[in-house]
Image (cartoon, helix red, strand yellow):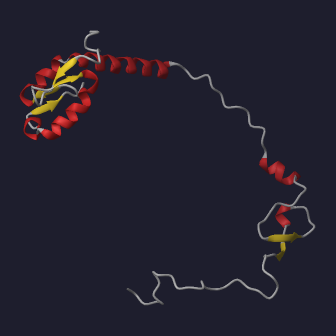
Amino acid sequence: YSDSLDPEKLLQCPYDKNHQIRACRFPYHLIKCRKNHPDVASKLATCPFNARHQVPRAEISHHISSCDDRSCIEQDVVNQTRSLRQETLAESTWQCPPCDEDWDKDLREQTSTPFVWGTTHYCDNNSPANNIVMEHKNNLASGMRVPKSLPYVLPWKNNGNAQ
């Protein structure tokens, strides 16, 4: 088992039997060699448990049933399933904290007037429901107004003509 994890171990390339590749470089080599040997690549299938396993298409079902890496994947699935069951079986002890907020009460007790963008004065009545906007303010000098159109024609607008 420790021999299979050795990064310096030489592995034979499934696409070219003359290639002996270090285990740490093997995945990169497989990609490169698959592109260089499309005729051989079309005859091989990749193991779903370990992409380093390139097996003849006729033998892939036998390989899947006997692959050494299958047991590792299956064990991971079993462990995940067990941990999920344990998590769902455990009862939650979390409780919603009590709510102290009363927004209606806060609104009734509010003494300052609320902020409203673009306005400056309100009536003196402190009831928020009775606040009436008295004057609108803008930042333009007196005698100036906001333009009603842009100073240029937009490229996608053609003076009302359809394109």
The structure residue drawn at horizontal position 30% and vertical position 20%, both measured from the top left corner, is 73
The x, y position of residue 98, in whole percent, is 73, 33
User: Which quadrant would residue 67 be assigned to in this image?
Assistant: top left
- Residue 132 lies, with reference to residue 1, above or below; the image says below
Judging depth in this view, the residue of 61 and 41 nearest the camera is 41
Please say if 125 is above or below 31.
Answer: below
Residue 144 sits in quarter: bottom right
x, y percent for residue 80: 39, 21
Q: Quadrant of the N terminus?
A: top left
Foreground of the two, 47 or 152: 152
Q: How many marks?
A: 0
Q: Is residue 9 left or right of residue 143?
A: left
Residue drawn at x 64%, y 86% is: 148
Pick the front one: 48 or 152: 152
Most extreme residue toward the right is 124
Residue 11 falls in which quadrant of the image? top left
Asked if 103 appears above or below 120 in the picture, the reply is above
